[in-house]
Image (spheres, rainbow, N blue to C red):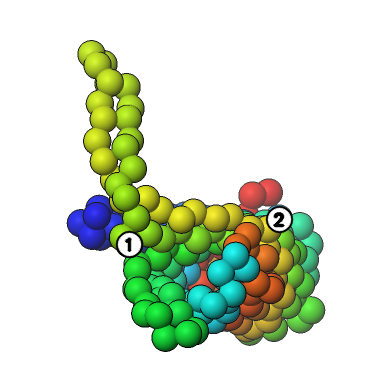
Amino acid sequence: MDFARRVTKTVLWAASASFALAGVAHAQRFGYSQSSGREGDVDTFFSVGYIGGDTGTLSHYPNVHMDLDSAWMWGLGAAYHFTDTWSVLFDFNFAYTGMQLTGTQGNGYYRSDADYFNGRVNLEWTPRPGPISPVLSAGIGWNNFRTAVPGAPPQIICAPTFYYWWCGTGVPTFDTTAFAWNVGGGLRWDPSPGFFLKLMYTATFADFSGVNGTRQFNQLMLQIGGRVKTR
């Protein structure tokens, strides 16, 4: 299981970096004047940053307290500038973290690894576009959280192959997806026409089934990418 997670993380890192570098290379090849504005431009970027942890109680087990660790995040995305000041952004971010469940009446605890994923569609406003620009952002999306269930009986997994059905056992998992909404702000720097850096703080809110209350995840992400014209 740990080996598979490491392979998945390495593939995602490589794909994300390649995605951003391809955009930068394309932008440098087909460069244009910074004074021409951003309307019609497309951004592609790789992002890296940090997401804060969270605490709460389980709705079906009020005597169980949940602690989700902070973690590094990475991801990739793209944006389209339909005017000089307004753009729409699509991105995906991943984190590999840990979770602890603790009995509030002194009846023990357990820890487990956890995967966190969010995808979103945001509308962004850049009121003063230029080499250094403030950015405001808001949007909707989804958050996914998945973790193994230590101590649970193994579950049987079967799948068809070319000649026969294959069956095996695996560790049961808890997997939940929730609708999410977010708001954020930050600063963008375009040191050259085809390259940009953008540092964004985002607060993401989600209501997960089985967890009391609306959860808030605070993220600080650096986007590194390229910008090209499509017209």
Q: Amino acid at mark 1?
A: Pro
Residue at the spot x=68%, y=81% of the render?
Answer: 185
Q: Residues within 10 Å of mark 2 (few under 14, many from 20)?
A: some
Residue 109, horizontal then vertical, whole percent: 37, 78
Compared with residue 1, is residue 32 higher up or lower down, i.e. above or below? Answer: below
Name the residue at the left extreme.
Answer: 3
Q: How many marks?
A: 2
Residue 101, horizontal then vertical, whole percent: 43, 75
Quadrant containing the N terminus in the rendered view? bottom left
Comes first in the chain, label 2 or label 1: 2
- Residue placed most toward the observer, 3 or 106: 106
Pointer 1 residue: 150
Is there any visible trace of residue 49 in the rendered image? no
Say what secondary structure mark 2 lies in: loop
Name the residue at the top extreme.
Answer: 163
Residue at the spot x=54%, y=77% of the render?
Answer: 63
Q: Amino acid at mark 2?
A: Gly
Left/right placement of residue 184 relative to residue 221 reads: right
Say what secondary structure mark 1 lies in: loop
Left/right placement of residue 199 relative to residue 166 reads: right
What's the mark number on residue 40?
2
Residue 126, horizontal then vertical, whole percent: 74, 75
Residue at the spot x=40%, y=65% of the render?
Answer: 114
Residue at the spot x=35%, y=68% of the render?
Answer: 112
Residue 20, horizontal then vertical, whole percent: 44, 60
Is there any visible trace of residue 108 in the rendered image? yes
- Residue placed most toward the observer, 34 or 101: 101
Mark 2 or 1, closer to the camera: 1
